[in-house]
Amino acid sequence: MNKPQWAVLISAILIFVVSILFPPWLYRCEKWSYSGGYHFFAKPPDIKDVCPTSTPLPGPLPTVVRNGSRQGVQGIVLVVLTAGLALILKTPRTNFSVVLAVLIISMGLVGLMYLGLMIQFEV
């Protein structure tokens, strides 16, 4: 491995460690889920009344859980993009490795778009 590949690998490991230390959280209501943001894994976000209700009485407080699906997709996208970048930075380059790297990076970008939709709609 050359220096740029090592830099990509070390950066990916650091990003992965930070994403494990600060996972995404969800407020789960009866019918809906709302993002709780990213917080330290040992200190979940404070429970606040974010559940909409049609009655004048206050509804039950939401539960706060880690968003494992979003964290899993983040990890997969990170691995795919790291592999694509490491492949495109290898020396000597061949046409096959460049094409393969572009395909892998394209898959990673599609994963990033899916992650953006997950964040927007809290799937």
Image (cartoon, grey):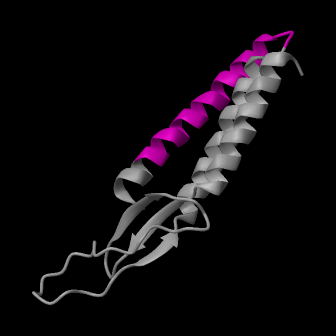
Residue 82: image location, x then y, percent? 71, 33
Q: Residue at x 50, y 73 (%)?
A: 65
**Which quadrant of the structure image shows residue 36?**
bottom left
> Which quadrant of the figure contains the C terminus?
bottom left
Q: Residue at x 44, y 67 (%)?
A: 26
Residue 99: image location, x then y, percent? 70, 19
Looking at the image, residue 86 lies above or below residue 3: below
Residue 30: image location, x then y, percent? 33, 82
Left or right of 91: which side holds 60? left
User: Which residue ends up furthest to the bottom in the rendered image?
Assistant: 57
52 in the magenta segment: no
Name the foreground residue: 82 vs 63. 63
Q: Residue at x 54, y 42 (%)?
A: 111
> Which quadrant of the figure contains the N terminus?
top right
- Magenta range is 91-116
Looking at the image, residue 99 lies above or below residue 49: above
Left or right of 81: which side holds 83? right
93 in the magenta segment: yes
Name the foreground residue: 13 vs 107. 13
Looking at the image, residue 1 lies above or below residue 32: above
